[in-house]
Image (cartoon, rainbow, N blue to C red):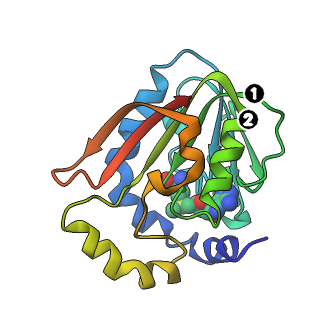
Amino acid sequence: MTRTADFYNCFSFFYPVVDVFLKPQKRRLYSEINELPSGRLLEIGLGNGLHLPLYKTHQITGIDTSSAMLCIAAKRKPENVELLQMNGESLLFRDGTFDYVVLSHVIAVVDKPDKLLIEIHRVLKPDGRVFILNHFTPENWLRFVDKMFQPISRLFHFNSVFHIQSLPSIVNFNLIDEISFGSLSYFKLKIYGKA
Ligand SMILES: C[S@@+](CC[C@H](N)C(=O)[O-])C[C@H]1O[C@@H](n2cnc3c(N)ncnc32)[C@H](O)[C@@H]1O
């Protein structure tokens, strides 16, 4: 598939170490999602699926480009979850299929984030919701840290400098809610609807 998929195939074994730091934000993400009326939910780049048991409602479709990540996720897959190897930048679903789309630490990883947003907009129902959990490069001093780490972060197949407003297709979405994590608010959960 892609070089990012190759990277995550190799990295899948170590990913649980990274995951330890992300757990509190993810618990909040999935509790927000569990509050919603039952529907069809697409999680793009679901990774090793450690969090899958946190989904209490909804019919879940999880996709990832990394076969190694999907293999681990398949071992803990509850019944309401289907897993597919698929690229989020070219989704094989019909227009308006999903009520909810979830991106947890994925949008700064994919090769073409704008294409990803275009595809999400296409497969989302008119009144659907998109949940984007990620780091967002702020305007404060942390932007210099992100800039410094950008060359290293590319070696690990993500962008430490990430500005969602620089993606042209973000104009097709309305920001409905924003939840910040930690005192520096570096990590955020942004919830969007269709504009
Ligand atoms: C940083 S991990 C995040 C995993 C999980 N969502 C989490 O929060 O722990 C990024 C995941 O996105 C997947 N990925 C990268 N590019 C992708 C793409 N274009 N389509 C689908 N998945 C992709 C990677 O294989 C990896 O599993």
Q: Nearer the viewer, residue 173 or 28?
A: 173
The percent position of residue 190, horizontal first and vertical second, equals: 41, 39
Query: Which quarter of the figure has residue 42?
Result: top right
The amino acid beneath tag 2 is Val
Is 132 placed left or right of 189 in the picture? right
Query: Which quarter of the figure has residue 21?
Result: bottom left
Image mark for residue 123:
2
Going by the picture, which residue comes out furthest to the left?
183
Q: Residue sitting at 43 percent across and 62 percent down?
A: 162
Q: Residue sitting at 62 percent across and 71 percent down?
A: 8
The percent position of residue 116, horizontal first and vertical second, equals: 66, 52
Q: Residue sitting at 72 percent across and 61 percent down?
A: 65
Q: Do the residues labelled 1 and 2 touch (CB within 8 Å)?
A: yes
Is 109 placed left or right of 143 in the picture? right
Q: Nearer the viewer, residue 152 or 25?
A: 152
Q: In which quadrant will I find the C terminus?
A: top right
The amino acid beneath tag 1 is Gly
> Mark 1 highlights which residue?
96
Q: In this view, does 155 lie above or below 54?
A: below
Q: In which quadrant will I find the N terminus?
A: bottom right
Crowdedness near tag 2: few (<14), some (14–19) or many (≥20) residues, C-alpha within 10 Å: many
The percent position of residue 56, horizontal first and vertical second, equals: 53, 26
Is residue 75 visible in the rendered image? The answer is no
Helix, strand or loop for disc 2: helix
Q: Which of 122 and 23 is in front in this view?
A: 122
